[in-house]
Image: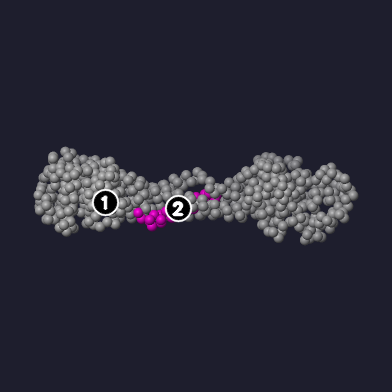
Amino acid sequence: MYIMIKTSDLTYKYPQGPQFSFPDFTCDSGEKLLILGKSGIGKSTLLNLLGGLTKAKTGKIHIDNHEVSSFSISKLDAFRGANIGIIFQKNHFISSISVLENLMLTQKLAGVKIDRKRCDQLLEELGIGNKANSKVNNLSEGEKQRVSIARAVVTNPKLILADEPTSALDDDNCQKVIELMDNQAKKVGAALLIVTHDNRLKDIIDNQIILS
Amino acid sequence: MSLLKLAWKNIIASPLTLLLNIILFALGIGLINFLLLFNQQVKNKFENNLADIDMVIGAKGSPLQMILCNMYHVDNPTGNIKIEKAKPFLNPKHPLIKRAVPLSLGDNYRSYRIVGSTYDILDLYNGKIKEGKKWVRDQDVTIGSTVAKKTGLKLGDKFVSSHGFEEDEDLAHDHTAFTVVGILESNGTVLDQLILTNTASIWNVHSHVETDTVEDDHEGHDHGDHDDHDHGNHEGHNHDDHAGHDYGDHKGHDHDNHAGHDHDDHAEHDHKHDNSIADLLNHPEEEITAILIQFKSRTNFQALSMPRNINENTDLMAASPAYQINNLNANIGVGTAALRYLALLIAFISGLSIFISLFKSLKERKYELALMRVSGASAGQLFFLIIIEGLILGLVGFAIGIIVSHLASSVMASAMSDAYQYSFDSWKFGKNELYLLLLSLSIGFIASVLPAIKAFNTDINKTLNAK
C-alpha cells in the first residue's frame, strides 16, 4: 500500500465566480476516501481538478508520483485515460454502440489493451452480463450506473473518482453500489474517492474529509 | 472499436437523417454523373461518326436534319436528289474532292436502315468484313455487327425490307428480298447499325413500290431494255410479265457480264450494277439521298467555299458536319448546362444537409464527445471522428449516386437504342467518376469541418457539469 493521490494548497477560481480553497489530503492505493460537503461548496470542482478536467489556480496534485497539475492538456488527456476512472453524477454513454462496445472503446481511447474478456467478466461481476449487447439507452438507471462503474474500472485505473454515485438510490442500493465500487477498486488496486453530500455514506466509509 | 467503426455506428444510429443525407447526396452526384455520361456518350458517337467527312450534299431542307440523317442515321432525309444534278460531285476527277460516297436511303429491316452506297462507305468508316464478303450483286447486303446481333440475321439469310424508317409489316416490299452475304466487324461507328447494299438495290425496291401505286410514271420506259438486269430489279414488274418482253436481243448472253454491252437506246447504261460511281452516273434519271464528301485539302479555299457555292447556285444543299454538330452540341449544351447547375445546386444542398445534421447531432452528442475526452481521446481524435462521419456520408452518397446514374443511363440507352438503333455502353466508368469521388469527399469534408472544429473545442468540464 502506498500513497496514490496527494494534494497540496489546491485553489480554484471561477472566471466570474467564487474562489475555492481545498484542504490537503492523501489517499492510498486500495483505499477509499469520502469527500463530504453541502451543495455549492465546490465538491464537483474538486473532482474536476483531481480528474484533470480543469486546471487549478494554485496548488499541486500528485497521482502515483506524477505531478499531474503540471501536465500539458494533451499529456493530461492521455494520463487521465490510462489512469483515472470517473463515475459521473449523470450517466452518459455513447448511445450508438452497445454496452460492451462502450467498454471496449474506453479501453481503446485509454490506450490500454482491448480486452473483451475483461469487459465481459466485469459486466458479469456487476450483474449485467446479459446486457452486454444492449444499447445503453435501453437500460434502467440502476443498470446504467453499473455500466458507469464498469467503464470507470475497465482500464484498471490507479484512481477512481465518483461524483454523487448514491444520491438517487434507496438505502439498499446505496449500500450495494458502494460495495461494488469498493470491490472493483480493491481488485485493481486503485484509490477510490467519492464526492457526495449523501450523509448515509458517513457510516460506510471511515476515511473522510469535510469541505466547508 | 476504431474511430472509423464508431463513426459508422454514429451515422447509422439515426437512419432517417442518414436516408435524407444519402438521397440528397446521391441525387446531386447521380445527376451530375448522368449528364456527364450522357454528354460523353453522345459526343463520342458524334465524333466516331464524323469519319473525316467534310461536306454532305443532299436535297434542300434543314442542314442539321440532313447531317443527322445521312451521317448519324437518326432523322429522316430532307428528300432525294437526281443523279443528274449530283453528277459534278460524283465525278472521280473532281479537282477538290478526294472521295464522294453516295447514299440512298428509304428502307429498313426491323428498324435498321438499308443504305445503298459504294464500297467507299466501308473505307470512310474503316469497316472490315468479319464474315462473308462485301455486297456484289443487286439485293446483296452486308450488315453491321449490331444488326446481326439484334436481328439474328446470318450469312445466306433472306429478308424483305419495309419502306421508311419505322418497322411496319404492311409496308413490306415483298417483291425484292435481300440476301445477307457479309457481316461487318463491330467498330463503334454508325456502320454497326446499318445494312449496306448497292444503290441499285434501293432503286429496285422502290421502283416496285412506286409502280405498284403509280403505274403511269413508267409508261414511257421500254421495259424490254431492262430485262438483262438482275431480274426483279425494275419498275414494278410482276415477274410473270417478263415472258412477254422481247428477250431476243439478249438470248445466250452471260447475264453476269453485261458491262460491255451496248444496248441500243440505253447505250450509256452499264447493266451490271457494279457498285461503282460510274454505274451511278449511267443512271442520271435515278435518285440518291445524299453524298458524303471528303476534300483533298481541308485548307483549300475553294473547297471551303464549296458548300456556300452549292447552296447559292444549285438546287442542292451542302452542309459541313463539323459546323452543324458544333451547333447542335452548343444547343444541347445550353440545356445540359442548366441541368448541371441544378445538379450542382443539389450537391450544394446535400452538403448543407450533411452540415446541419452533423451540427445537430453534435448538440445531442456533446456529452458523448466530452466523455470520450475523459476516457482519454484527444481533441484531434474527436475532430477526425466528425470528419470521418462527413467523409463516410460523402462516400456512400457518391457510390449510390454513381450506381443510380449508370442505371439511369442504361435505361436511357435502351430507350435510345429502341428509338435510333444506337447502342450506348452505359456501364463504362471513366475519369469523370474519379473527379466526382473527389468532389464528394470534398463536400463531405467541408460539411463536417465546422462541426469537427466544434467537437475539437469541446469543453469537458462545462459540458459534463452543465446542470
Find residue B436 and report its horizontal and vertical position in percent: 46, 47
Q: For the residue carrying disc 2, how many other residues have a C-alpha within 10 Å: few (<14), some (14-19), or many (20+)?
A: many
Q: Chain of mark 1?
A: A
Q: For residue B36: magenta?
A: yes
Looking at the image, do the residues carrying marks 1 and 2 touch, with CB atoms under 8 Å apart? no
The residue drawn where x is 66% and y is 42% is B130
Q: Quarter holding the N terminus of chain A?
A: top left
| Residue B79 left/right relative to B418 | right
Question: In the image shown, does B192 or B366 lie closer to the viewer?
Answer: B192
Mark 1 and mark 2: Cα distance apart in space: 42 Å
- Magenta stretch encompasses residue B236: no
The magenta segment is B13-39
Query: Measured from the top left, where is residue A36 in percent x and y?
Result: 12, 52
Badge 2 marks a residue whose secondary structure is helix
Displayed quadrant of residue A63: top left
- The verdict on a common chain for dots 1 and 2 is no
Does residue B7 appear in the picture of this structure?
A: yes
The structure residue drawn at horizontal position 58% and vertical position 46%, both measured from the top left corner, is: B44
Determine the secondary structure under disc 1: helix
Q: What residue appears at the point 31 percent right and 52 percent down from the top-left corner?
A: A133
Residue B81 visible in this rendered orientation of the protein = no
Disc tally is 2
Q: From the viewer's side, name the closer residue of A2 and B167.
A: A2
What amino acid is found at the position of numbered circle 1 in the picture? Gly
In the drawing, what numbered circle is on residue A129?
Answer: 1
Q: Which mark is residue B81?
A: none
Q: Which residue position is annotated with label 2?
A: B26
The structure residue drawn at horizontal position 11% and vertical position 45%, both measured from the top left corner, is A25
Q: Position of residue A83 (x, y in %)?
A: 21, 42
Task: Report the side of B440 relative to B295 (left or right).
Answer: left
